[in-house]
Amino acid sequence: MQSYRLNDLKITINKQGANRYTKASYPVRYGKFCEIKTPQYLFEFNLCGEIRHIRGLKPDWPHPSEWLKRSDANDWIFYSVGRYHRIFSFLGEYYLPCLSYPSNSPWDYDPFGDFTVHDALAAGSELEEKLRPLITNGVPSKIKDFAGRILGHDTKTLRRRTENLHQIIGGPVSALPPDTRHVDYNVIPLMVADGCLYHCGFCCVKSRRSFQRRSGQNIRRQIKRLQRFYGADLGNYNALFLGNHDALAAGWDSIGPSAVEAYEAFNFEKSNIKNPALFLFGSADSLLNAADKLFAALNQVPFYTYINIGLESADGATLVHINKPLGCHQIKDAFDKMLDINRRYLNIEVTANFLLGDRLAPDHYDTLIEMIRSGLERFYSKGAIYLSPLNNGRNRAAMLGRFVEIKSKSRLPTYLYLIQRL
Ligand code: SF4
């Protein structure tokens, strides 16, 4: 760590944050990063010189523990901790992520309409001018290099970098699995397949493509290009998202080599953040069709793996209503298999999504409660149930009330799924 002062700026490079992800109600930073402190703001940058976080330091900032984060998709997210009570029981996290793009949050708070948040974003872009004097002689070389890296990542460049990321993987990721909250959504995306099996009518994140595996050559090319893309900041990642909407359907021949090659290429063993994690989506069919040997092999890869399955409903009429071409027996069989895998494999955690809406039939909720309460003899801490609010909900208070009712009866950890993109 090295610090330098220039007028009212205090610049610190190579700060060491926490080396494993944790759940906290205050801002925790992970891995290695650099920061610039002004009397008004704390700006944090990754090792490539890209802005990562901004936190206001003056009393007019919404809350001293709140901050802004910029994702690799160049989206700003406001981490709100001071506005809502008991947010942890809804999300499993101590903050509410407020997104700068439309999603399915049942809360209305829009910090991006707040002028203090707006000013903070503007101040980030204006920092450039203040940093120019640092790239002259007489400034310690490491500080000068850091200032140069920041100046090389202006707003336009950051936007172009996101386009580059999307070009490498073949397009934006419309939804990350809910389990990626465990790594603060900091995942490297690697596409092993496109499209999905069902094209359900209700779904707002699906692509039009039919399900298709990527070739080994395509996956290897992505890995090489992603390695270059993350560059100096690669050491701050410990998590991989194998996409897209149903990577489990791609089978072990795609999942296994991709996970292992990415682990080595991204040097996760030496990551600044411990406990490497692997995330993928699956479907009822891909889970039911996956053989035991897939899970036995996955249990041996050097990751803790989360597989998130979109089950949506165990009620036949609701499945018809949402245009999901499955019967309730398939949903129940997939749920039973999820429980079985969670009991048998130490390094694999299967989680499931169900819908939450104010216009779904009572049978949807009755069958869900039947499965996650009556079907289990005790509480299990492994294998979360995520309830995904439908974004056509009109009565949000009723939806949240319904969530509390289900959570209080559930014998599995139960949270809301707020969809984030990448
Ligand atoms: S819910 Fe899943 S399977 Fe259905 S259309 Fe959306 S991505 Fe595809």
Image (tube, grey):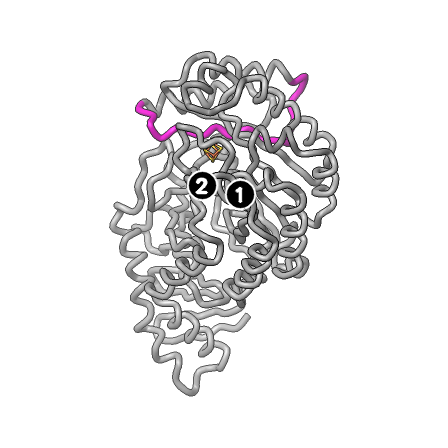
Does the CB distance between marks 2 and 1 fall below 8 Å? yes
Asked whether 359 or 209 is in front, the reply is 209
Task: Please identify the quarter of the rendering in which residue 396 is found.
Answer: top left
Residue at x 35% of width, y 63% of height: 39
Instruction: Tell me where the magenta segment starts and ends, as one range.
Output: 376-394
Answer left or right for 272 relative to 101.
Answer: right
- Which of 85/360 is in front? 360
295 or 69, which lies in front? 295
- What residue do we see at 49% from left, 54% from top? 169
Q: Is residue 243 magenta?
A: no
Element on which disc 1 rests: strand
Give the residue type that dot 2 points to: Arg
- The image shows residue 275 at horizontal and vertical percentages of 65, 50
Q: Which residue is mark 1?
A: 212
- Residue 209's label in the rendered image is 2
- The image quadrant of residue 332 is top right
Relative image position of residue 41 (x, y in whole percent): 36, 60
Q: Position of residue 188 (x, y in %)?
A: 54, 53
Image x and y of residue 335, in percent: 61, 24
Outermost residue to the bottom: 137
Which residue lies at the image location 66% right of the left edge and 61% below the top edge? 270
